[in-house]
Amino acid sequence: MHDYILQRVMEISTYILETGYTVRQAAQVFGVSKSTVHKDVTERLPQFNTHLAGEVRKVLERNKAERHLRGGEATRRKYLQDPGPSLQTLT
């Protein structure tokens, strides 16, 4: 594995652990695709640091378990900003 890839894997992994960010959020911060972040932390990281990989996996599993809550919150905020047409204008 190239040194720059190894460095990126370590930086992304420690960042996810420190912040609890999702794969998408980490990808945005580091300027790479979410596929790259996912591959880095699920395939490349366990090859050289199994303990760190296990800790990052816990964060990713927690994020996955909570994603329906984040989606619901985003929808709630969307409709609070612009509730759309009222029922009276539709009839």
Image: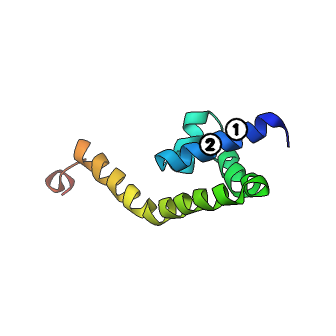
Tag 1 and tag 2, C-beta contact below 8 Å: yes
> Hey, which quadrant is residue 5 in on the image?
top right
- Up-down: is 33 above or below 71? above
Residue located 52% across and 43% down the image = 25
In this view, the residue in front, 19 or 51, is: 51
Q: What percent of the width, then of the height, locates residue 18? A: 50, 46
Q: Is residue 81 left or right of residue 57?
A: left
Q: What percent of the width, then of the height, locates residue 79? A: 27, 49
Label 1: state its secondary structure. helix
Residue located 23% across and 47% down the image = 80
Q: Which mark is residue 8?
A: 1
**Residue 82 in view:** no
Quarter of the picture containing the N terminus is top right
In this view, the residue in front, 86 or 43, is: 43
Residue at numbered disc 2? 12
Q: What percent of the width, then of the height, locates residue 51? A: 66, 59
In this view, the residue in front, 56 or 30, is: 56
Quarter of the picture containing the C terminus is bottom left
View extreme (left): residue? 88
Mark 2 closeness class: few <14, some 14–19, many ≥20 residues within 10 Å: many
Label 2: state its secondary structure. helix
